[in-house]
Amino acid sequence: MKKQKRYYREEPQPATLPIVSRYANGDYRLVKVFVEGYDDVAFWRGIFDDYETDRLKFEISVPPRQDLAKGKRVLLDMIPESSPDLLLCVDSDFDYLFDGHTEQSRLVNESPYLFHTYAYATENYLCHPPSLHRICAKATKNDTLIFDFEAFLREYSRIIYPLFLWYAYSARRKSERAFSLIDFRTSVRLNYLDLRDNGQPTLEWLQRQADKRLHALEVHNRDWTHEVRLFGEQIAEYGVTPYNVYYFMQGHTLLDNVIITLLHAVCDKLRDITTQRINMGTKQGVALKNEISNYNNALRNVREVLLDNEHYKDCFLYHKLQNDIERYVASLK
């Protein structure tokens, strides 16, 4: 006799897994903080560390979904679930600058339990110019000041500022016919750094490339020229100036196509300086080889050091985020 198959009805599974009680051990209030991706956990952990007490703790994680979905869109869809005990943290992208001009920007700027970076992304904070010499010193174990990152990046920003306005305005209009992200990235990337005169030869090369691109944009999109200028005046109210565009441009473009190029060039020079000092010392033979080996073993990957950077808290945009979190914490009392 043939056995009959048994059929079991599967119960539908919730998209979001159950959240552990905020009073997990009965001693403190535990607030869940959901971030866009795994790379963001360390950044937001470093921020919320400043607000933890014996009675208030934060737990940073990606959304605990069975489908493992992550990203900004997932968090925006969770806004109705957000509360004093469930916070959402996202990159601003252009939503801070587009405040009120798009539905998404209204959501990001007006949701009480959603915090955003104000800078374009977490990467823009990691690349905070005053912190970059420290990054090089940690990676190379050489603290010699051979390059002024702040001065170079001020000039870099001044050069790319007109192109940034065209790209950001194109994004706000949701039209890439004028200037797409790929075009912007290609126009502002640094392929090399000539350290002479604090990078002046590189800046002059970039200026020539930027001037050509800007001229082409203005010739082919004459009807936008006035609008782009007005757009620049509007976003100036949000803190954008010709000298700080690196906080508002796409974070990955800044980190991968600009800052890493600078750091590698400076670190290579610092390592050469240290190696030369060792070779010019009194040690010889095996002792010299051991000294060079010890130095090489102490070196760190500069990208890894950069990704661990937490020296950005004097940035004016961070102060805005800080004020938002402080208001939230005060509301819990």
Image (tube, rainbow, N blue to C red):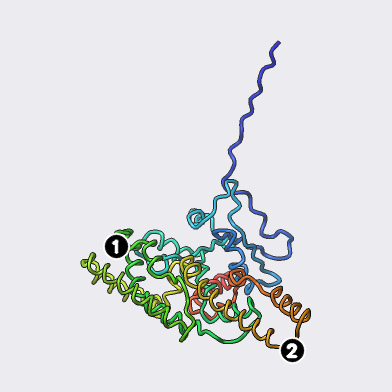
Q: Residue furthest top?
A: 1
Question: Looking at the image, is mark 2 or mark 1 earlier in the sequence?
Answer: 1
Q: Amino acid at mark 2?
A: Thr
Whether residue 304 sits left or right of residue 288 in the image: it is left
Q: Residue furthest front?
A: 285
**Residue occupying image coordinates x 74% and y 81%:** 288
The quadrant in which the N terminus is found is top right
Instruction: Tell me the tag on residue 207.
Output: none
Residue 62 image position (x, y, % from top left): 59, 57
Distance from the alpha carbon under mark 2 to that under mark 1? 62 Å
For label 1, the crowd category at 10 Å Cα-Cα, with few meaning under 14, some 14 to 19 and many 20 or more, is: some
Residue 309 image position (x, y, % from top left): 59, 73
**Residue occupying image coordinates x 51% and y 56%:** 71
Whether residue 208 sits left or right of residue 266 in the image: it is left
Q: Nearer the viewer, residue 324 or 301?
A: 301
Q: Amino acid at mark 1?
A: Ala
**Residue occupying image coordinates x 61% and y 30%:** 9
Q: Residue furthest right?
A: 286
For label 2, the crowd category at 10 Å Cα-Cα, with few meaning under 14, some 14 to 19 and many 20 or more, is: few
Determine which residue is flagged by label 2. 282
Q: Nearer the viewer, residue 250 or 279?
A: 279
Instruction: Tell me the tag on residue 178.
Output: 1
Query: Callout 1: helix, strand or loop?
Result: loop
Residue 87 image position (x, y, % from top left): 56, 62
Residue 316 image position (x, y, % from top left): 48, 79
Q: Nearer the viewer, residue 284 or 25?
A: 284
Q: Residue furthest bottom?
A: 282
Cβ–Cβ below 8 Å for labels 2 and 1?
Answer: no
The quadrant in which the C terminus is found is bottom right
Residue 266 appearing in the image: yes
Whether residue 282 sits left or right of residue 117 in the image: it is right
